[in-house]
Amino acid sequence: MLEITRSLHIPETELRMECTRGTGPGGQNVNKLETCVTLCFDLEGSPSLSAPQRSRIRQALATRITSEGVLRITSRRHRTQLANRRAVTERFVELLQEALAPKKS
């Protein structure tokens, strides 16, 4: 379970990870190993989100959401797939926290 806020937890089963070969760090392995990781989260189909939460996320992260309602976040910063998986998961939590944070007046 990923804790987004005190009242919102998203099970990791709702996240899909896609691994591809990517540019960036990797030395000799850059063109041989699938170290680039893209996290896909079905925003529209998630049972964990309420309608207002869905709306706020859709508004705040519009450029990262596909026409099918899937939020996509990519990491290719690290040399290993495991490190990129961690990084993309941390970024997912950060983005949702920012999108759902109360607006300052």
Image (cartoon, rainbow, N blue to C red):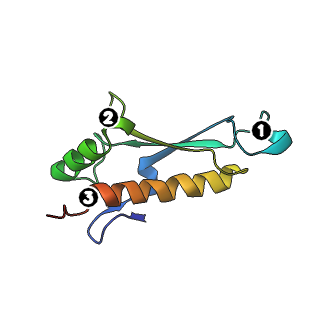
Disc on res. 69: 2
Which residue is identified by label 1?
30
Q: Earlier in the sequence, mark 1 or mark 2?
A: 1
65 sits to left or right of 85: left
Disc on res. 100: 3
Q: Amino acid at mark 1?
A: Val
> In the image, what residue occupies the spot 62% across and 51% down?
84
| Residue that extends furthest to the bottom in the rendered view of this protein | 6
Q: Looking at the image, is 73 positioned above or below residue 85?
A: above
Residue 64 in percent (x, y) is at 39, 38
Q: Looking at the image, is 49 positioned above or below residue 9?
A: above
Count all numbered tags in the image, as a single digit. 3
Closer-to-camera residue (50/103): 103
Measure the alpha-carbon separation of dots 1 and 3.
36 Å
2 or 3: mark nearer the eye: 3
Instruction: Judge the density around disc 3: few (<14), some (14-19), many (≥20) Cα neighbours within 10 Å.
Output: some
Q: Amino acid at mark 3?
A: Leu
- Would you identify the image quadrant in which residue 76 lies? top right
49 sits to left or right of 84: left
Instruction: Judge the density around disc 2: few (<14), some (14-19), many (≥20) Cα neighbours within 10 Å.
Output: some
Residue 20 in percent (x, y) is at 64, 35
Residue contact at pointers 1 and 2, CB within 8 angstroms: no
> In the image, what residue occupies the spot 31% across and 46% down?
46
| Residue that extends furthest to the right in the rendered view of this protein | 28
Residue 18 in percent (x, y) is at 57, 39
Q: Looking at the image, is 18 positioned above or below residue 100?
A: above
Closer-to-camera residue (34/95): 95
Q: Is disc 3 placed on a helix, strand or loop?
A: helix
